[in-house]
Image (cartoon, rainbow, N blue to C red):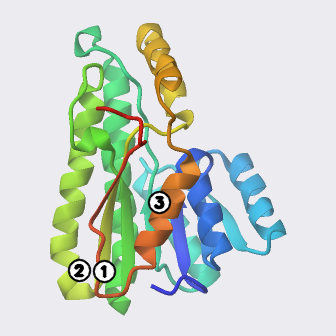
Amino acid sequence: MELKGKVALVTGASSGIGAATAKKLASEGVRVGLAARRLDRLQSLAEEIKAAGGEAIAIKMDVTDQESVNRGVQRLVQQYGTIDISFNNAGLMPISDIASLKVNEWHQMVDVNIKGLLNTVAAVLPVMQEKKSGHIINTSSIAGRKTFSGLGVYCATKHAVAAFSDILRMEVAPKYNIRVTSVQPGAVESELFEHISDANYRDRMEKLKEQMTFLKAEDIADAIAFALQAPEHVDLAELFIMPTSQPW
């Protein structure tokens, strides 16, 4: 895909991988819809992108609310005329043992990581189907391939994302020329650690930074740009991106 002039929706754009990818795409000439709940951060990011010569609008969106997602997608289409790329990146990663019964955290992960992604796909897919082109990128994780203690529900949500992404690719790529990519990062420096309410697991995750060099959000953004710019007949269905020093 030639990126210049294309239109992208980026959810979870207020920080981390979402913000880095939005900036990367804007630098390649993509007009970006920045979607998240924290409007002040989105507005600051939009100004940063514009100052660098790019185009972006801030869209307050709660991916767990289908109407909020629909309104955001409609606004982006009204602003730029279409949607060519949807980077469905919003996610949460609280860590705790299942026996801790942090049920509220379980539901939050399911609502954001799975339902939020489904809501966004449901909103953007008709736009792409109508014009028979587009690229949907979903953020899964190494936790969508492997399982880890303390990440029971998170792993379940990311396995769901990986499975849904592959089936979506099977169904829409041949019929509508819509490519689908599942991004599966290993350890990345991000705000996800801030969601960990269990002090023991949070301490463990912080100590991991002393054991290996984490990926940067910009590393994932570069990989996403690479996938988007592949020839039209090439669908990089999975991007499994690991720190060189990560042994597991």
In the rendered view, would you say 13 is above or below 246? below
| Residue 61 is at least partly visible in this image | no
- Residue 178's disc number: 1
Mark 2 residue element: helix
- Residue 236's disc number: none
Q: Residue 237 placed where, x, y %?
A: 26, 67
Residue 120 quadrant: bottom left
Q: Earlier in the sequence, mark 1 or mark 2?
A: 2
Evaluate if marks 1 and 2 touch, with contact meaning CB atoms under 8 Å apart.
yes
Q: Quadrant location of the C terminus?
A: top left
Towards the viewer: 14 or 28: 28
Q: Earlier in the sequence, mark 2 or mark 3?
A: 3
Kindly identify the residue that appears in the image at 43 percent across and 43 percent down: 91
- Residue furthest to the bottom: 131
- Residue 173's disc number: 2
Evaluate if marks 2 and 3 touch, with contact meaning CB atoms under 8 Å apart.
no
Q: Earlier in the sequence, mark 1 or mark 3?
A: 3
Mark 3 residue element: helix
Q: Is residue 225 left or right of residue 165?
A: right
